[in-house]
Image (cartoon, helix red, strand yellow):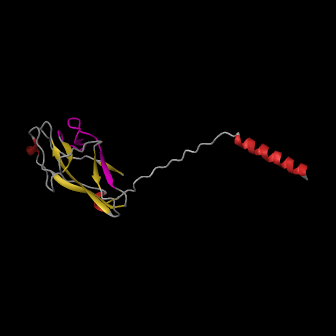
Amino acid sequence: MNNKLKLSTVFISALLSHAALADPVTLNITGNIVASPCEISSDSVTKTIDLGGGSPIQASTLQTAGSATPWVTFTIGLVNCPAGTTKATIQFHGTPDTDNPADMYKNSGTAGNIAVQLQGTGGDQFGDGKSFTGILPGTSGATYTYNLRARAYTQNGGVTPGTISAVVTVTFTYQ
């Protein structure tokens, strides 16, 4: 019986010494926590901004270089922002106007020598790729409103009659 105990002890010692010589294992555990998105207000999902304010724009008012229509203000709203979301960044995308890409978009309509200018109501320029970050309180159900304005603008004057059309899409990122 004593020999069996010695043999078992030698076998267990051999297993333990083999385990002690094994290669170490490193675990790299990672993750990414992101802010949950807000909802886009139902009246902001698709916007049509009429630069004439419901009336046709007279080509004769846009014959001088640097002339423009009056600003048309509008908003894009976020609602039901979840707790912990403290920033919402809006980014603008569209075909930039070659003369003024900082805040203008190319007219894809039939009118000539005209572009669409897009800014924040404070004068922030929102051309292609530009963004603006709104600060939210981080509480559940928070809202945020982006106050914007647009107008038709002519760099060189001599606007010809036709339609004005520019498509600008926006994306949001949250923190």
Q: Which residues are magenta?
A: 86-113
Q: Position of residue 41 (x, y in %)?
A: 30, 61
Q: What is the number of callouts on the image? A: 0
Measured from the top left, where is residue 169 in percent x and y? 31, 48
Q: Is residue 145 in the magenta section?
A: no
Q: Residue furthest front?
A: 2
Tell me what residue is drawn at x 10 percent, y 37 percent. 65
Q: Residue at x 20, y 47 (%)?
A: 119
Residue 87: in magenta span = yes
Which quarter of the picture shows residue 98? top left
Q: Residue 41: in sight, yes or no?
A: no
Residue 72 place in picture, x, y as percent: 17, 53
Q: 131 or 171, which lies in front?
A: 131
Residue at image position (54%, 47%) is 29
Query: Is 141 drawn above or below residue 127 in the view shown?
Result: below
**Depth check, front residue: 51 or 75:** 75
**In the shown orientation, is residue 165 left or right of residue 57?**
right
* Image spot of residue 93 (x, y percent): 30, 44
Can the viewer see residue 143? yes
In the visual, does 74 lie left or right of 9?
A: left
Q: Nearer the viewer, residue 2 or 143?
A: 2
Q: Residue at x 36, y 56 (%)?
A: 85
Report the side of 172 relative to 127 (left or right): right
Q: Main secondary structure of the magenta part?
A: loop
